[in-house]
Image (tube, coloured by chain):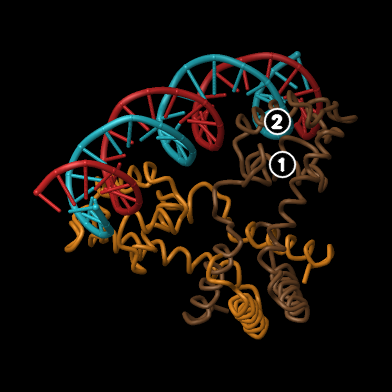
Chain colours: A orange, B brown, C red, D cyan
Amino acid sequence: MTLDAQTIKQIRDFNRFYTKILHLTDRYHLETQFTLLESRILIEIDQGMTSANQLGQFLNLDKGYMSRILRRLKDDDILVEKPHDQDKRIKVLNLTAKGAEILAEINQRADNQIQTIFKRIPPKDVDQVVANMAAIQATIRRYQSVRD
Amino acid sequence: MTLDAQTIKQIRDFNRFYTKILHLTDRYHLETQFTLLESRILIEIDQGMTSANQLGQFLNLDKGYMSRILRRLKDDDILVEKPHDQDKRIKVLNLTAKGAEILAEINQRADNQIQTIFKRIPPKDVDQVVANMAAIQATIRRYQSVRD
DNA sequence: TGATGATGGTTGCCAAAGTCAACTAACTAT
DNA sequence: ATAGTTAGTTGACTTTGGCAACCATCATCA
């Protein structure tokens, strides 16, 4: 089931192209004061991540570093923590009202970024692109093992 | 030509999925002595980037920082520079033999990463995925302005 | 119960990464 | 010639991130 060289080349080419398009390598995310990492943390907390440890595992971050980032976000009144009911070691994270606002702002900008990229493309072609994306996603998902 | 909310959502959903699958947001470039940035520089030089300035623009890097990274790569005998024929300010960059070897190693590892992700997928489906990627790339490229 | 080991999180210390501004040398245009 | 740009370097920083030691809590089990 090994891929031939040409296939790999095409996939890697797409990856380079797409990461560039999304500005994934830019230092600041979407021209906010927040880094990509901070944005992702807010997003993941909003999506249900509840503790520093969960976030650290998911985002693959050193726990010391994680602790510091969260400290900053707490100092800036973007999130709060309260002790976990059952396990007092765990601090449950939640966005503050301000944090929710900021997240909304980030989402708005992310939406705008997509608009900027796709607005020149005729609707029919956009639909085709979206269908292709969905197909890629479905295929990879179908054969994905739990462990990676 | 504005996209509807559902379309944007689907695209962003794909983006999150794909960046996660490819570990595109990981900060570690596993098991080489080189950082992701150094790897990208070698790749881009190999792909035809010729000067610090070009690289800096493309990779969106501070020129001071760029200068230092290149200094290190030169000290390590990974690349060399020679003056540009017409413009003596410009230093034309080239990989050394050692640099080419290292690039080959980096490419090998990147290829392996792709293998790991796609090896469970039947060849027919992989071909379909690759075709979808190519289609996405072609469509976006076709309507892309020079400025973003 | 209390010893042992694992887990969630914090902190100090440090190296690597990245920023910013000032600077030189070479180019371009008038 | 002069003025304004551009390619690249350097010094002086700040930020990011990695590592290990540490504390508090939890879980297990004799």
Q: Earlier in the sequence, mark 2 or mark 1?
A: 1
Q: Going by the image, does B89 lie left or right of A65?
A: right
Where residue B86 appears, as percent x and y from the top left, is: 88, 30
Q: Going by the image, does A27 lie left or right of A38?
A: right
Q: Nearer the viewer, residue A87 or A37?
A: A87
Chain of the residue where label 1 is placed in the rendered structure: B
Where residue B116 appears, as percent x and y from the top left, is: 68, 63
User: What residue appears at the point 44 percent right and 52 percent down from the top-left corner?
Assistant: A37
Residue that mark 2 sits on: B70
User: What residue appears at the point 68 percent right and 58 percent down from the top-left corner?
Assistant: B113
Residue that mark 1 sits on: B41
* Amino acid type shown at disc 1: Ile
Circles 2, 1 touching at the beta carbon (< 8 Å): yes
User: What residue appears at the point 83 percent right and 39 percent down from the top-left corner?
Assistant: B100
The C terminus of chain A lies in quadrant: bottom right
User: What residue appears at the point 84 percent right and 62 percent down from the top-left corner?
Assistant: A5
Asked which secondary structure carries label 1, the reply is helix
Residue A120, above or below A64? below
Q: Nearer the viewer, residue D20 or B47?
A: D20
